[in-house]
Image (cartoon, grey):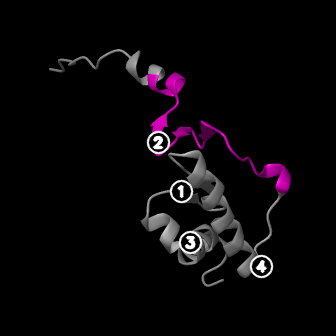
């Protein structure tokens, strides 16, 4: 690893992007470091797309933890976001915290 461990996340992210370029460019996969989220608008697509991702993980000898894998969720919360179908949004309680914040006031300083 060049320049020590502090660059490990960016190198790992780049490696994941080179393994899954089609999935990312087609917009049905979201990858953040070692988290892979597969999005589908139909059940038929959701039967096909995870299989494509799993085949690639086998090809590159990537290890997965089955207890950390989740399949066939209609909505998933990950990294402070809500993934549903092909949409990505912010969790409601986090959005509410921002909306309930008081508006900034101008402070007159002489």
Image quadrant where one finds the C terminus: top left
The vertical placement of 97 against 26, above or below, is: above
Residue 74 highlighted magenta (yes or no): yes
Q: CA distance from mark 3 to mark 2?
A: 19 Å
Residue lying at 60% horizontally and 81% vertically, measured from the top left: 3
Q: Earlier in the sequence, mark 1 or mark 2?
A: 1
The residue nearer to you, when weighing 31 against 56, is 56
Disc 4 to disc 3: CB gap under 8 Å: no
Q: Earlier in the sequence, mark 4 or mark 1?
A: 1
Disc 3 to disc 2: CB gap under 8 Å: no
Disc 4 to disc 2: CB gap under 8 Å: no
Residue 96 rendering spot, x and y as whole percentages: 46, 20
Disc 1 to disc 2: CB gap under 8 Å: yes
Disc 1: which residue = 30
Disc 3 to disc 1: CB gap under 8 Å: no
Disc 3: which residue = 20
Residue lying at 43% horizontally and 64% vertically, measured from the top left: 26
Mark 2 burial class by Cα count in 10 Å: few <14, some 14-19, many 20+: some
Give the structural element (helix, strand or loop) at label 2: strand
The vertical placement of 4 against 73, above or below, is: below
Disc 2: which residue = 88
Q: Which mark is residue 108?
A: none
The part of the chain drawn in magenta is: 66-95
Give the structural element (helix, strand or loop) at label 3: loop
Disc 4: which residue = 61
Mark 4 burial class by Cα count in 10 Å: few <14, some 14-19, many 20+: few
Residue at the front extreme of this rendering: 44
Q: Where on the picture, by quarter, is residue 104? A: top left
């Amino acid at each position: 690893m060049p320049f020590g461990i502090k660059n490990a996340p960016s190198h790992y992210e780049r490696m994941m992007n080179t393994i899954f370029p089609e999935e990312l460019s087609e917009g049905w996969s979201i990858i953040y470091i070692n988290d892979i989220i597969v999005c589908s608008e139909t059940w038929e697509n959701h039967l096909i797309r995870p299989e494509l991702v799993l085949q690639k993980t086998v090809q590159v000898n990537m290890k997965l933890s089955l207890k950390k894998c989740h399949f066939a969720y209609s909505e998933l919360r990950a990294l402070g976001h809500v993934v549903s179908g092909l949409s990505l949004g912010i969790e409601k309680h986090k959005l509410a915290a921002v909306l309930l914040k008081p508006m900034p006031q101008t402070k007159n300083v002489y």
